[in-house]
């Protein structure tokens, strides 16, 4: 309500999405660390984890930029100042993806697809709801932006970094497969080829 003092329906959206993320995350944690885990297949847990990760990234893309929040509130004041929120959102999304790669047990393929879906979602949100960040400047084909619009560069960086973090997940999966194969061999079981 601080952004839109007149109220309206839009301020409820970030609160509802935040509560939904918290609810799904808590449900995931309760199932993961309780006897209920045996009643759910690993696929169910992967879907539950993917949903809270995706919703959290959606929230960061939509609501972390003050300029984007003002656009959603229908205010015109956002056009008068620069808003670095897009780059900040990308950094937070990368932090979430890195933490998930290290702590949540998602297979490589699912994590890779999830990372690219999140990056594409951020690209779409950045294109459809641009925050003001030097959009009126003429394109220069040198420097950091290489002539690209300022909203596009962080989105492309997010795609590349999500791919890199997916490779970390691949290496973890391969390491786990090697450990399982060695353990089965040492226990005298035959390792399938």
Image (spheres, helix red, strand yellow):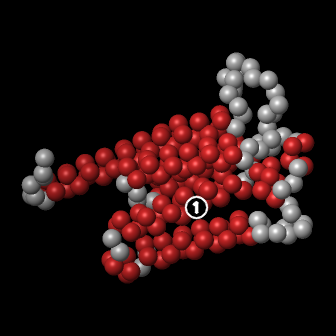
In this view, the residue in front, 1 or 111, is 1
At horizontal 20% and vertical 52% (from top left) the residue drawn is 181
How many numbered discs sit on the rendered protein? Answer: 1
Q: Position of residue 47 (x, y in %)?
A: 43, 64
Assign the N terminus to one quadrant of the image.
bottom right
Percent x, y for residue 21?
59, 68
Q: Position of residue 34 (x, y in %)?
A: 42, 79
Residue 140 picture quarter: top right
Confirm whether residue 66 shows in the render: no
- Which residue is denoted by mark 1 in the rendering? 55
Q: Is residue 104 above or below residue 108?
A: below
Under circle 1, the secondary element is: helix
Pick the front one: 57 or 127: 127
Taking the spot 84% from the left edge, 40% from the top edge, the residue there is: 82
Q: Residue at x 9, y 55 (%)?
A: 190
**Left or right placement of residue 91 versus residue 168 in this view:** right
Q: Residues within 10 Å of mark 1 (few under 14, many from 20)?
A: some
Image location (x, y in percent) of residue 75: 87, 54
Please tell me which residue lies in front, 183 or 27: 27
Judge whether 29 appears above or below 188 on screen: below
Q: Residue furthest bottom?
A: 35
- Which residue is at a point 81% across and 59% down the rendered structure image? 73
Is 99 rendered above or below residue 133? below
């Amino acid at each position: 309500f601080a952004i839109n003092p007149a109220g309206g329906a839009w301020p409820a959206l970030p609160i509802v999405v935040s509560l939904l993320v918290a609810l799904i995350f808590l449900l995931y944690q309760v199932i993961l660390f309780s006897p209920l885990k045996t009643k759910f297949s690993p696929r169910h847990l992967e879907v539950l984890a993917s949903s809270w990760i995706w919703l959290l990234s959606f929230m960061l893309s939509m609501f972390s930029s003050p300029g984007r929040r003002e656009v959603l509130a229908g205010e015109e004041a956002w056009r008068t100042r620069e808003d670095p929120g897009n780059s900040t959102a990308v950094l937070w999304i990368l932090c979430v993806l890195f933490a998930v790669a290290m702590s949540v047990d998602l297979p490589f393929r699912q994590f890779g697809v999830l990372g690219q879906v999140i990056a594409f979602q951020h690209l779409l949100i950045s294109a459809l709801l641009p925050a003001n960040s030097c959009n009126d400047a003429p394109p220069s084909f040198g420097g950091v932006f290489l002539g690209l619009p300022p909203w596009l560069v962080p989105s492309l960086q997010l795609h590349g970094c999500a791919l890199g973090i997916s490779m970390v997940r691949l290496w973890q999966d391969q390491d786990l497969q090697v450990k399982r194969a060695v353990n089965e061999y040492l226990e005298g079981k035959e390792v399938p080829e």
